[in-house]
Structures are given as C-alpha cells and as structure tokens.
Amino acid sequence: MEIAILGTGTVGRTLSEGLARHGHRVTVGTRDPEATRARDEAAFEGVTLRTFADAAADAELVILATSGQAALGVIEAAGPSRLAGKVLIDVANPLDFSNGFPPSLSVCNTTSLGEQVQAAAPEAKVVKALNTVAAPVMIDPASVAGGDHTLPICGDDAEAKATVTALLAELGWRDVLDLGPISGARATEAYLLLWTRLYAARQSAAFSIKVVS
C-alpha cells in the first residue's frame, strides 16, 4: 500500500520504519524536504521525503503524525482535496505544554482534535488510532505484555475502521476496540492526561492498557 506519513518527529519516523518493514511503500511528508534532510540527514537516510501536498496526493492511506498544535495546519498544507476519499489515521494528541509538565489539553469535553481534523478534511475518512501508546509500542505491541493489551480506535466510516484494523493487525495488534464515531476521540485524547502521569510515575513509556470483563 502507498502510505503517506505527515510528520517527521519520533512518531512519524517510527511508523515509517515499522510500516516499511511490512512491505508498504512509505513517503514522509514535511514542509520543506531539503531543509528537513539537511537538518538531520542520518535520521532520514533511505526515507522518501516530499512536501505534505505531494505526499498526500499520491497516497492510498495517510497518517497524521504531527504534534497536536501543528495538526490542522498540516491538513491545510496537505490540501483537503488531496485527502478526499482516503483513509486518514489521526495519531495526534492536543497536548498543551505551555505551563510545563504535566500537560493539559488544548481542546476537550465538547470537541476533540480528531473531530477538528475530520472537519478540516470533510471528505477524508478519519480514524483516530495509535494515539494512546508511545511510538515504539505502535509498531511493536508485543513489547508490552506480549501484545495482550487494548488499542481503542474511533471514526465515522465503518469501512475505513476495518482498513485500519487490518493494518494494525499487520503490526501485531490483536485487540483493537472500536469506540464508535469520531467523537470517541474526546475520550482517547483525554486518556493522555492519565498516560502522561503514568509515564512520570513509571519513568518509562513501555506500557499500555487492557480492557477486561
């Protein structure tokens, strides 16, 4: 599958490496490919870098892997028309570190970043996923409890969620829990308030949650 990852941070690079290992053709989108490679050539060795717009245009599936603050600007730069009809996995979280750690949420309760992304790209099929675990766990869920933990997803399009679930299965995710429409992102993004405190208490990001009954 042709996959575009919008974002060159830790999450974007990690997902790029993980998906490429499973045979997907991955392009990483950035505002200025030449400047990005010049800034850290070693980190992007062997990685195809293109502008957000060019990466989105040629992709079958797009992953938004930016910070929460940058997310909507990147959607605009990619171009909503280039995202139309495509599955768009939103991994971003609206974390606000302006007052230090632990962060607050820049949007919550009555809306979510996931809903804002869907509104910004109305013809895309947005699925919120992978935003509840650290980047290494995204591509290697077996690194935590042998993979026996739960990944929540949500989105308005059932077919898109099935596509994302199949892609997650390739990465090793066995327990994917569908929370319903994209408004479920209000809950998964709010979980980051707990996640950041668990991280501080454990001094490790190698953890996840399991829903049991």
Image (tube, grey):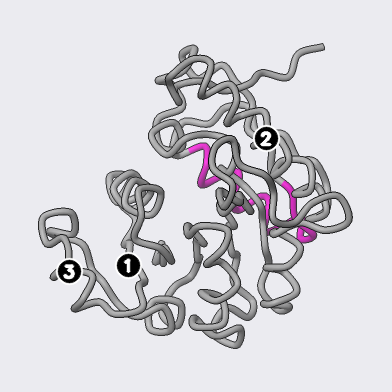
Which of the two discs, 1 and 2, labels the residue nearer the N terminus? Answer: 1
Cα distance between the residues tagged 1 and 2: 31 Å
Kind of residue sitting beneath label 1: Thr
> What is the number of the mark on residue 37?
3
For disc 2, the marked residue is: 193
Cα distance between the residues tagged 2 and 3: 33 Å
Q: Is residue 103 above or below residue 26?
A: above
x and y, in percent, of residue 118 in the image = 72, 69
Q: Which residue lies at the image location 69% right of the left edge and 49% below the top edge?
A: 105
> What is the number of the mark on residue 27?
1
Instruction: Determine crowd level at label 1: few under 14, some 14-19, many 20+ residues with C-alpha closer than 10 A.
Output: many
x and y, in percent, of residue 201 in the image = 53, 16
Q: Which of labels 2 and 3 is toward the front?
A: 2
Q: Is residue 77 above or below residue 171?
A: below
Q: Nearer the viewer, residue 133 or 203?
A: 203
- Residue 166 position by quadrant: top right
Which of the two discs, 2 and 3, labels the residue nearer the N terminus? Answer: 3
